[in-house]
Amino acid sequence: MKSKYLWLFLFATALLFNSCRKTDYATINSPAYLRVFNCLEYNATLDNKDVPVPFLAFLVDPVMDDAGVPVSAAITGDFLDVRSEWAMPYPDAASNVIWQKEFPGTKRVLAGPILNGYDLSSWAQVPSGKHHIVFRTRPLNNTPYFNLDKLERGVTLIDTTIDLTAGEVYTMHALIAEYASQQPFMYLRQETFTKQPFADSMVYVNFYNLSSKNWYQLAPDEITNQYLVSTKLQDTMQVYYSLNKRNGAVLTPLPGYKGVPMGQIIHSLEPRVAPYYSFPLFADTSGNKIFTGNMSQQFGFFGTGFSPENLGYPDFLPVGAYAGLILGDYGDAGKTSYLPFKIRTDLRTGLIVSIHSGTANPRSFATVNTIEYINRKFYVTTIQRKFAPPVY
Amino acid sequence: MMGLLLVLLMAGCSKDDLVPPVDKTTVPRNMGVFIENNYDLSLLSAALKKTGLLDSLNQPGAITLFAPDNAAFNRIGISTPAEIDRMNVDSLRFMLRYHMIRNRYFITTFPKQMDNKYLSLTGDALYVSVDKQEQFIKDDIFTFVNGAYIMTGAKRNIALANGVIHILAKPLQYKKETVQDYISKDTSLVLFAAVMKQFHLWNDLETKDPLTLFVPDNAAFLKYGLTAEKIATLKPADYQPLAFGIYTLMMRPMHIFSVDGYILSGTNVYGANMIYFNDTYSIGPSYMRNNYLGTEESAVYIGKRTGPNWGANEEGPAVVQYKGGLTNADHLCSNGIVHIIDDLVFNPDLMKQ
């Protein structure tokens, strides 16, 4: 009898404690969506070793002390390392790394919603309106920015203001404005993919050349001990694409998708959305239209007068005549003058997301992609659509 | 029965104090006590006593001390406490305080990059550089203060009650004066000063900041027949600017310690450890440490490009040594770093234009 009361008491206590739990859901009124990349490449040499290392703290509306050192900020994107070659379509939730390849990255923030079918979980919600933006350098360690000694809080690389419109999607870059002076600047692009009438049976891709001004003219054509043949892109290049069926290391071009003209990649630091081009999600007609089959996408960039038909051996071509990029299960190894750029994207299908969804495993989904060329490097951003969760 | 239970109950309630007595021998000592009782630090101890700083190191408050041990003092020619006693108290105190920074810094708390700037107790900056390359023992990562190597193993991260001690391979050398003052106070560098004046570079040594100088001593100039009289007859217009400008790195704003080339050679950028002039000549400080033998090797390498290939310097020696070894490198001044070398980089006769 007694124990019965005891259990009752315990049960009541448990109820009491549970009912006391109160969750304050963070909300941001009329947010804009912001994703930030650090595109400042850095190679330390004796010549530039005193230059501040572009390992950044991204600060929104910082409060500065009298000496101009930030003491707090409304939003802090700390440990902002140089962006990775492939910006994945979703933040890697399992990752507990401290150094970030982008903002918000894996930082716990209010992420963007599903907007018009696009998964904006890689975008952070930011209050719309005017903001003061500061990029500071910080030491290469694991101490949060505002726990650092004031002496260690680096220097300001970028200090600017932005005006964000509610409900809009923005991509921000820290870029180099001019090659000789190496002065960095902020580049803010208002994205339009959520508003464009894109079919979900096509994969979309657009191209930007965000290299710094005078980069093509001044940067070395060759660097000793580095594989650099055909890695420089002129201000305007023609883009051709090829879709390959991939069986291990063997690539077989899909019929009708070898060297297809696509559009242009134009050098501009104006934050204007470049036109999107597309190729079909299920280009391989032998497939089952659920999984597109192991494949990779290949993009060729051709200077005036060159095309896939008349391209010679790239090592013998002038600088700026050709560059090539292939996407899929590739690392840095095995670069050739035909394919000097290889980027690891979706391991099975490159720019296409193939994942367990519903009862199909894998199932392929079309994406919207941005390919950016910045000072001899390619960066790919993949945006995925919402898809049904897996059924086991 | 009840009584027995009660007794058992009481006995069960008895709680022995199981905390062992405090072991007085393992309580961390203060830094001052540690230094005073360490044979390897007897010269440092003598210097701290002479300047009255030893007491400060027994006070609470965290300090990180980069401590030159006796071997380090020996390298700059100090081997007995009597020699320490003959030194000027004020400059000695300044030097010792320059070896200390506030707060407790263990090796892993230094960011893994070059030239982490810390303010010493004199208010002047010292620079901690951490190598990117991992060592087999993680804590043994190569770490340098103003180009001075921090010893590994038990000689670093010595945690004490009021701070941390890291043992240095050579004492830090900092003078609160311009590089021009530094050179003019050293009589073994008068010929270099004469050349700088003759080539109208002397005033820049006072005003430009930062600078890195590779300064040949008098013997090096005499080797090429450049006496004070001969230097007075040299005409700057006859020589390429690099002939003597190389010693100031053409006044480029650089501050390079003797180990920086070594740290950068660990990166994957080809030739990052050299400084280039007109794409024709290169100069780079090299450094090698053998931790098994406890030896350091260093030199300044000069290269020349012929066609696409970099080779040895043709207008002078390919390798120049620091005069008397590494202790004559890394003299930090308020507007730059002075390295004393024992040979000219270029034979002036071959650098006429």
Image: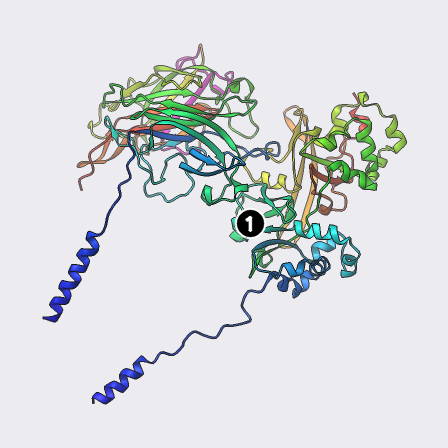
Q: Nearer the viewer, residue B260 or A111?
A: A111
Q: Position of residue A67 (x, y in %)?
A: 54, 36
Residue at figure coordinates x 23%, y 21% from the top left: A199
Above or below residue A218? Residue A14 is below
Q: Nearer the viewer, residue B58 or A203?
A: B58
Give the amino acid type for the residue marked by disc 1 in the picture: Ile
Q: Which residues are magenta?
A: A305-333
| Residue ID for mark 1 | B141
Residue A213 seen by the camera: yes
Mark 1: secondary structure:
loop
Q: Does the segment drawn in magenta span residue A324?
A: yes
Q: Position of residue B101 (x, y in %)?
A: 60, 50
Q: Quadrant of residue B160?
A: bottom right
Residue at figure coordinates x 54%, y 68% from the top left: B26
Quadrant location of the N terminus of chain A?
Answer: bottom left
The residue positioned farthest toward the left in the image shown: A1
Q: Position of residue A250 (x, y in %)?
A: 35, 29
Main SS of the magenta part reads: loop
The residue positioned farthest toward the top in the image shown: A305
Q: Is residue B125 left or right of residue B18?
A: right
Q: Is residue B208 left or right of residue B156?
A: right
